[in-house]
Amino acid sequence: MKILISGKTGQVAVELQKHLAGLGNLIVLGRDVLDLSQPEQIRAQVRAHKPDLIIIAAAHTAVDQAESEPELAFAINATAPGVFAEEAAALGIPLIHYSTDYVFDGSKPAPYTEDDATNPLGVYGKSKLAGELAIAASGARHLILRTSWVYSTHGKNFLLTMQRLLQERPELRVVADQIGAPTWAGTIARSTRALIERWQAGETGAWGTYHLTAQGETSWFGFTQAIAAHLSAQGKACATLEPIPASAYPTPAARPQNSRLDCSKLAREWQVTQPEWTAALSDCVAEQPR
């Protein structure tokens, strides 16, 4: 089986390359060979490789930066997935795409289900939602996997930033009134492998949109407390933490206050479940060099 992965150095793409090893021939397309803002490059690569499965693991994920470059965000997050999906439909192959909690406005008091109305607050969320709609309209068999608060041992993410700041500063003020589920990129990759294996075994659930995050919930402040606890267990001194409201930390792009996603549909349809966020964090930290 040939699996074409768009993305090479991103958090999820790196984990996919580790966790999909042995499933087939991985065709990994980074920016050096594929500019996602150029639809014809996408079509040319898919037609040249004729894969059996496409995984879109590359995206414009700079949430604040997207506010000042909406055309690029929409080209990468909306147009490109649609082109991939059109090519997948033409080949008669499935496609896996990763989306985000930012397609919701965060005003719901309970975790969001796949049937809840979308209402993105900013350019990033709007561009990702447009990508979802383009894939759905293509006719390709697809899995759109919405996740949240992604972190890993590489790239730019909350875990690595906080590990650094906790050791550099005497005090840290962290937002405590936005709630979600920190999700390790390794968890996403493992679940993706499980989904592919069920497809290969002919045990697929319904194709479509699903939520895929770690279980449980916390705030950015709670996530930081957990990160600090791991550092302390390694004998490293950490900053004093102070919880603050999101209003005290303004950003160019508005964030959903509630990013919790109900993942029961994925467990029900595909028998794929996720670990608690605290357990996944421990697994991720264990992979880091000391």
Image (cartoon, helix red, strand yellow):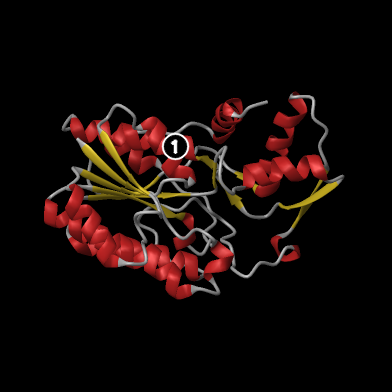
Placement of the N terminus among the 4 image quadrants? top left
Residue at the location (12% across, 50% down)?
Answer: 92
Q: Is residue 42 above or below residue 17?
A: below
Residue at left 45%, top 55%? 100
Q: Which amino acid lies under the numbered mark 1 shown in the image of this protein? A: Glu
Within the image, what quadrant is residue 273 found in? Answer: top left
Question: Can residue 129 be seen in this snapshot?
Answer: no
Name the residue at the right extreme. 170
Q: Is residue 192 visible?
A: yes
Examine the rendered structure and indicate whether residue 96 appears above or below residue 229: below
Location of residue 38 with respect to 149 vertically, above or below: below
Residue lying at 24% horizontally and 50% vertically, measured from the top left: 142
In the image, what residue occupies the spot 67% across and 46% down? 161
Provide the residue designation for mark 1.
15
Q: Nearer the viewer, residue 29 or 249?
A: 29
Could you classify mark 1 by the number of other residues whose Cα lies within 10 Å: few (under 14), some (14-19), or many (20 or more)?
many
Query: Which quarter of the figure has residue 31?
Result: bottom left
Q: Position of residue 80 (x, y in %)?
A: 32, 63
Left or right: residue 112 versus residue 155 is left
Q: In x, y percent, where is residue 116? A: 39, 59
Q: Secondary structure at mark 1?
A: helix
Q: Is residue 68 left or right of residue 18?
A: right
Numbered marks: total:
1
280 and 180: which is toward the camera: 280
Q: Position of residue 98 (x, y in %)?
A: 38, 51
* Residue lying at the far front of the rendered structure: 32
Q: Position of residue 202 (x, y in %)?
A: 16, 33
Quadrant where the C terminus is found in the figure = top right
Task: Left or right? Give the position of 154 relative to 208.
Answer: right
